[in-house]
Image: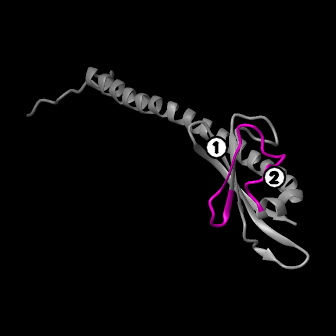
Amino acid sequence: MSPKKVFNERGISLIEVVSSIVLLAIILVSVINLLPQMGKKNNQNEDKQIAVNLASKELAYWQSTLKSDINTLLANPNATFSFIESGDKLTYDGDDTITIKTSNTRSMSSKYYTEIKITKTPDLDSQPTKANQISIFIYKNNNILVAETYGYVFY
């Protein structure tokens, strides 16, 4: 007759305890490493949302501002304009684009600055209305593009 083996299964062995602690530590470390990345992404999304709203406000501002001066701007980009403030830079590349780089946003104060590009050739060239495309680019420090939008200046 073979003796019966008796197994004591009433407790937890030391190996099981140590392995469960190691497993929990690995999971905890991986979750903790995700937290800074989630915070950074939240900040980027907040910047993006603010800039998208700001871009649409800037577009409306520039559409209304350029409406009265668009003919002069298209005919002579090197002239002096009331909407160009100190710190702003108006350039004309000679091809088809007039660029205005501003040191701040016009529609509301913010930490962003804008670049406005206006095409000289109208997309809509019918009488009595013409329409030139205007693109708004919103940047934050170090020339990081955060948002962009475009529309038309009708005149």
Side of 32 relative to 53 (left or right):
left
- Please, is residue 19 above or below residue 153 in the view? above
- Please, is residue 73 above or below residue 81 in the view? below
Image coordinates for residue 22, horizontal then vertical, percent: 33, 26
Q: Nearer the viewer, residue 12 or 118?
A: 118
Q: Is residue 84 magenta?
A: yes
Q: Residue at x 78, y 40 (%)?
A: 85
Residue picked out by circle 2: 62
Residue picked out by circle 1: 139
Separation of marks 1 and 2 at Cα, in angstroms: 16 Å
As shown in the figure, which amino acid type bears the numbered disc 2? Answer: Trp
Q: Residue at x 75, y 37 (%)?
A: 86
Side of 37 relative to 84 (left or right):
left
Image coordinates for residue 149, horizontal then vertical, percent: 71, 56
Image coordinates for residue 90, horizontal then vertical, percent: 70, 50
Q: Is residue 18 magenta?
A: no
**Quarter of image, res 3:** top left
Side of 7 relative to 2 (left or right):
right
Q: Nearer the viewer, residue 46 or 150?
A: 150
Q: Earlier in the sequence, mark 1 or mark 2?
A: 2
- Please, is residue 77 above or below residue 1 in the view? below
Image coordinates for residue 147, horizontal then vertical, percent: 66, 49
Where the C terminus falls, by quadrant? bottom right
As shown in the figure, which amino acid type bears the numbered disc 1? Answer: Tyr
Q: Which residues are magenta?
A: 76-98
